[in-house]
Image (cartoon, coloured by chain):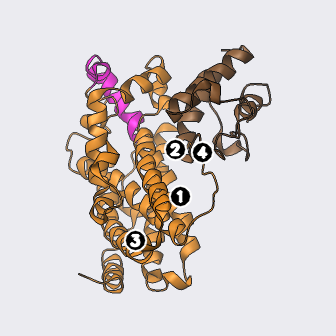
Amino acid sequence: MSNEAGIRDALRQWIADTNGKAGTTDLADDTPLFRNGILKSVQVSDLILYIEELAERAVDVEQIKPGVFRDINSIYRNFFAGNHA
Amino acid sequence: MTTLPELTERLCRISREHFIDPFSRLEWPETLDRDQWFMSPELISLHGTEHFDSMSEEQQQLLSFFEIVNFFSINIHGERMLIEGLAKRLYRKHTEVVSPYLHHFLDEENKHMFYFGRFCNQYAGKVYAEKKLTVEREYAEGEEEFLFFARAMLFEEMVDVYNRRMAKDQQLVPLSREINWLHHFEEARHLAFGRRLVEELYATHGAGWPDNVRRRITDELVQFLEATWKEFFNPEVYKDAGLPDAYALRREVLADESVAARRIALCTRCARTLLKVGLLSEECIQ
């Protein structure tokens, strides 16, 4: 998937499905995912694998910097917008 | 019941008397043919699904090679986390009693990582990457300490179920069987120590935790169990074994009823210390 809006929507849907209570309309691109308790740290592994699937390449976890999963904007910027983590 | 200082002394004595040198104990063939069983078929992540049933025995054995590399990689990452945490806890006020055993624990975990790492690098040319990150947060009194040892115990309980079964499986490549046996032999002591320490830490801190902290701890431990279980379903393994649509395959297999039943049975068994103290219930593992 290479379309920016499509990627953001796919991430939003995955986050809503994983949370189980939040709907996609509750999730703006700048909604803090971990600070607001929408995702938990143990769900990062599944998120990384989902990002790999969307990006069609492996994520190098050792290169990941703090804050890359802060919100949908951060995830898009770090993994899909050419500035890969 | 044996006190923690008594158990610590006993485990130190056994570690000294049953010292194993893995550097000379294991025989390492230069290469290993991949048309053999490296992991017991019933422990392979796809086992019990139609995907596994539709594979030839040769394909299943190739998958078993990459699955054992993944299993050893999971062990490497879990033990590295353990070593980091144990080293931080040496000779602190609250760990004075157990510090003598922490030395053996660290020494043995380091040796385990040696043979797991050598197997992965020598025969697969890699260790599968860890996909876990910890998000920093604040903790209640005793919570961080308890969670560290409870996670360590759950991790070791889970890998020990695999070790014990493969240590006895005569159809496995001897090196794989031997590594599993060696690991189980020393992990049995670590588990006895871990279970006792977790009970002790819970008795010390548990009563002081308000309901929201207890719920948070319960949630984290249940999620840790599930996340650890999911590490056995690695899309990189499926790609290496030549299986198509690796990510979709992972999702599909994790949703399979027989796989979910295996998860519940395994996690319930691994959580028995936490079920015993009443922090977890069988319902929350479903």
Residues tagged by mark 3 and mark 2 found on one chain of the structure: yes
Q: Which residue is mark 3?
A: B202
Chain painted brown: A
Q: Which residue is mark 2?
A: B121
Amino acid type, callout 2? Asn
What whole-number distance in Å separates the C-alpha atoms at marks 1 and 2?
17 Å
Amino acid type, callout 1? Arg
What whole-number distance in Å separates the C-alpha atoms at marks 4 and 2?
38 Å
Predominant SS of the magenta segment: helix
Q: Which residue is mark 1?
A: B80
What whole-number distance in Å separates the C-alpha atoms at marks 1 and 4?
27 Å
Between marks 4 and 3 in the image, the one whose residue lies nearer the viewer: 4
Local packing at callout 3 (Cα closer than 10 Å; few below 14, some 14-19, many 20+) is many
The span picked out in magenta is B49-68
Amino acid type, callout 3? Tyr
Q: Residue at x 70, y 29 (%)?
A: A28
Determine contact: label 4, label 2, CB under 8 Å.
no
Local packing at callout 2 (Cα closer than 10 Å; few below 14, some 14-19, many 20+) is some
Residues tagged by mark 4 and mark 3 found on one chain of the structure: no
